[in-house]
């Protein structure tokens, strides 16, 4: 159960970001949301009925009363201030509990997109008794009122922050309950066996076993396998969510900045014949088949001629350590196989994928994979398959389509499907890790014949950590940490 108490006050916040626009949206949610709006809203209808006909909602005195109006309707009218002076002409959307986003009575006011008007409307309702919402409080109330589970509310934040089609699809899948359903299935299987273990504790004096230990071990092992699969998907999910970090590195004048410009189809980086032009990192987004790749152009790798360039080289090496993919670019005229191997050894990272990009092929069209990675060439620490050697002419944008194909294959994988369940939340990963450790204790305990009470204790711990993902079990600290990262108004 959730430890947080259900709120009983009314909150208000702008749901649109700061700045001038055509419309600003103000949200109210709570038991007094409709009454507070009715206090300042003067309208004559009309409200559109389900039959599409105009209807007017009136009190006994003949005036429009928002408190008696139908939900899921739009109402046009005037919003007055405390002195009954016109503040703005607005459209009010009305939702009654529990059929709303938060599960509470909710009002959304669409006013003109002036920051002054938006703030004046918010302050008006605060003076009337509403409270300014905390970041993510609308979504937190949706969770507390059972409108969605915890992983789904986190998916809302991911959906808002998505910067690529793949990140958008992944967040939508989680919002529809993909993660919750998978974890719920694992948890239910464990609960079924846990109930039998708990039953044994009630008959401890009679020394009986209701839960078949062999079946329990098989179940725990299958759950651990599923957990391992989900954890393996986290690297991809996190990369898709935040963009796949792709560092472009190589020696000065290898064509790194020219390649960046060619991939982006714009003059983003300064290109010069002078070696060492790039002194700092330049980061831009490249979208390949709906997946965002964070391209990071770096300073050339060489012995620095001054302090500024030395800092740039240090930053290059640091960026490579943080990257998922390294695009090593070299000049086929100026770089020998020994120099290439030397650079790759200096840049080696165990968990980073490598694409070797042979640039300026028009100057030496006979350059081949075997020339740099054949049997007679001293091997580097990297294993470079033939498909990961990409000859290009960056200046003429030649063979860039193949380079993008290889980038996508290394960053996402050929077998990835948009409906695959992929873990993208670090909190979920940590909870699965703790659950897996508890299940490992279950197996270890059974292998040495521990009593049912110790097995039950470890299973309870695993169930607790699995329950943290969807919020079946939660704490105030956990909820505060999660929802504080949301934007205000959501």
Image: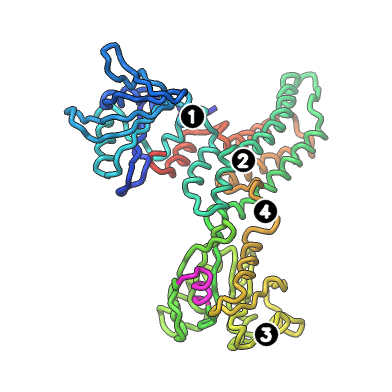
- Indicate whether 370 appears above or below 437: below
Packing grade of label 2 (10 A; few <14, some 14-19, many >=20) is many
Q: Main secondary structure of the magenta part?
A: helix
Residue 261 lies in the magenta stretch: yes
| Element carrying mark 3 | loop
Magenta span covers which residues?
256-266
Q: Residue at x 71, y 32 (%)?
A: 190
The residue mark sitting in front, 2 or 3, is 3
Q: CA distance from mark 3 to mark 4?
A: 33 Å
- Indicate whether 16 appears above or below 472: below
Packing grade of label 1 (10 A; few <14, some 14-19, many >=20) is many
The residue mark sitting in front, 1 or 3, is 3
Residue 3 seen from this side? yes
- Indicate whether 30 appears above or below 395: above
Mark 1 and mark 4 residues within 8 Å of each other at the beta carbon: no
Viewer-side residue, 469 vs 83: 83
Q: Say which residue label 1 marks.
A: 144
Q: Using the image, tell me which numbered label, if any, was put on residue 63.
A: none
Q: How many marks?
A: 4
Q: Say which residue label 2 marks.
A: 179
Q: Position of residue 394 (x, y in %)?
A: 55, 78
Q: Say which residue label 3 marks.
A: 367
Residue 120 occupies which quadrant of the picture? top left
Q: CA distance from mark 2 to mark 3?
A: 48 Å
Which of disc 2 and disc 4 is earlier in sequence? 2
Left or right of 77? Residue 475 is: right
Q: Say which residue label 4 marks.
A: 416
């Amino acid at each position: 159960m959730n430890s947080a108490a259900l709120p009983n006050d009314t909150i208000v916040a702008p749901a649109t970001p700061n700045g001038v626009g055509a419309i600003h949206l103000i949200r109210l949610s709570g038991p007094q949301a409709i009454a507070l709006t009715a206090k300042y809203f003067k309208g004559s209808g009309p409200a559109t009925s389900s039959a599409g006909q105009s209807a007017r909602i009136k009190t006994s005195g003949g005036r429009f009363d928002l408190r008696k109006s139908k939900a899921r309707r739009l109402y046009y009218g005037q919003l007055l201030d405390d002195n009954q002076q016109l503040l703005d002409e607005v459209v009010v959307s009305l939702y009654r509990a529990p059929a709303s986003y938060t599960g509470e009575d909710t009002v959304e006011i669409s006013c003109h997109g002036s920051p002054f008007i938006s703030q004046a409307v918010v302050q008006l309702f605060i003076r009337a008794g509403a409270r300014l919402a905390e970041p993510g409080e609308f979504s937190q109330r949706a969770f507390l009122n059972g409108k969605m589970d915890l992983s789904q509310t986190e998916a809302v934040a991911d959906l808002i922050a998505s910067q690529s089609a793949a990140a958008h699809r992944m967040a939508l899948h989680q919002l529809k309950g993909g993660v919750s359903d998978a974890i719920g299935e694992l948890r239910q299987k464990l609960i079924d066996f846990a109930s039998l273990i708990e039953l044994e504790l009630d008959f401890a004096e009679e020394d009986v076993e209701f839960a078949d230990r062999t079946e329990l071990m098989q179940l725990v092992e299958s759950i651990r396998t599923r957990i391992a699969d989900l954890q393996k998907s986290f690297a991809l999910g996190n990369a898709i969510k935040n963009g796949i970090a792709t560092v472009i590195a190589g020696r000065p004048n290898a064509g790194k900045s020219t390649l960046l410009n060619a991939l982006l189809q714009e003059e983003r980086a300064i290109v010069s014949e002078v070696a060492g032009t790039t002194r700092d990192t330049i980061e831009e987004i490249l979208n390949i088949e709906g997946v965002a790749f964070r391209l990071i152009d770096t300073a050339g790798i060489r012995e620095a001629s001054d302090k500024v360039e030395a800092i740039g080289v240090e930053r290059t090496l640091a960026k490579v350590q943080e990257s998922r993919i390294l695009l090593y670019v070299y000049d086929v005229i100026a770089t020998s196989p020994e120099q290439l191997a030397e650079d790759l050894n200096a840049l080696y990272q165990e968990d980073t994928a490598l694409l070797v990009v042979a640039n300026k092929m028009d100057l030496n069209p006979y350059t081949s994979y075997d020339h740099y990675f054949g049997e007679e060439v001293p091997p580097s620490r990297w294993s470079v398959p033939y498909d990961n050697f990409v000859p290009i002419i960056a200046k003429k944008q030649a063979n860039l389509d193949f380079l993008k194909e290889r980038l996508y294959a290394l960053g996402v994988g050929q077998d990835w499907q948009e409906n695959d369940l992929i873990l993208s939340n670090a909190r979920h990963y940590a909870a699965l890790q703790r659950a897996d450790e508890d299940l490992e204790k279950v197996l270890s305990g059974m292998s040495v014949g521990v009593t049912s009470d110790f097995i039950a204790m470890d299973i309870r711990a695993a169930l607790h950590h699995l329950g943290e993902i969807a919020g079946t079990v939660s704490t105030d600290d956990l909820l505060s940490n999660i929802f504080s990262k949301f934007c205000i108004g959501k």
